Amino acid sequence: MTAELVQAGFGVLRFNFRGVGSSSGEWSAGIGEQDDVAAAVAFAAQAYPDLPRGIVGWSFGAATSLRFQARDQSALPWVGIAPPVASDLTPRLPAPSELAPARRAFIVGDRDQFVGVEELSDYAASLGADIHVLKGSDHFFYFRYPKVAEHVIATLNSATTD
């Protein structure tokens, strides 16, 4: 998906949360990881000052980045790919009243092993966010990355023209 976003004119910053890969620190159940998102957003703003910005997260990253948006009242456009609505391993998704207004969309597979499509659809509706359900896809969207990227790019592009 990174290549598709770059080709569409977006600057892309991919990072590991604390304690993942070669990053330092320890996992903190999505609390400290919100600081990681804040640092990434600040870095991207400096690295790509003339490009449109948004946040895209997958699973834990989607839940954590949406919690960041609530904490910091971020109005950046946001796309969440398969964020669990309720999980012991991810932060709780924020209530609509906790979020600043922003363009938001969700992407989920109709065969997702970890995310209930109906539950996520209800949550998206409560935010006034779009939801894209990809038929035949599970949590990992094997062989569907171009379609996922298409929805991400469309959401981010629509936010820059609003």
Image (tube, rainbow, N blue to C red):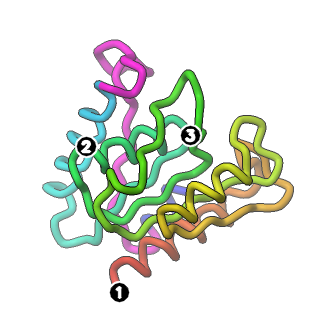
Q: Nearer the viewer, residue 146 or 129?
A: 129
Q: Is residue 48 above or below residue 82?
A: below
Q: Which numbered disc, 1 or 3, marks the residue that appears first in the sequence?
A: 3
Q: Position of residue 132 (x, y in %)?
A: 66, 66
Determine the main secondary structure of the stretch shown in magenta: loop
Q: Residue furthest front?
A: 97
Q: Quadrant of residue 54?
A: bottom left
Q: Which mark is residue 71?
A: 2
- Magenta range is 7-31
Upstream in the sequence, badge 2 or badge 1?
2
The structure residue drawn at horizontal position 33% and vertical position 29%, both measured from the top left corner, is 33
Q: Is residue 8 magenta?
A: yes
118 on left or right of 58: right
For numbered disc 2, what is the local secondary structure? helix
- Which mark, by number, is residue 85? none
Q: Residue furthest top?
A: 26
Residue 112, given in percent of the width and then of the height, sits at 76, 44
Query: Foreground residue, 86 or 54?
Result: 86
Residue 94 position by quadrant: top left
The residue labelled by disc 1 is 161
- Residue at point 51% right, 53% down? 80
User: How far apart are the two marked residues, 1 and 3, measured between alpha carbons?
Assistant: 27 Å
Local crowd size for mark 3, using a 10 Å CA cut-off: few (<14), some (14–19), many (≥20): many
Q: Position of residue 118 (x, y in %)?
A: 73, 53
Question: What distance separates the C-alpha of mark 2 from that of mark 1?
Answer: 26 Å
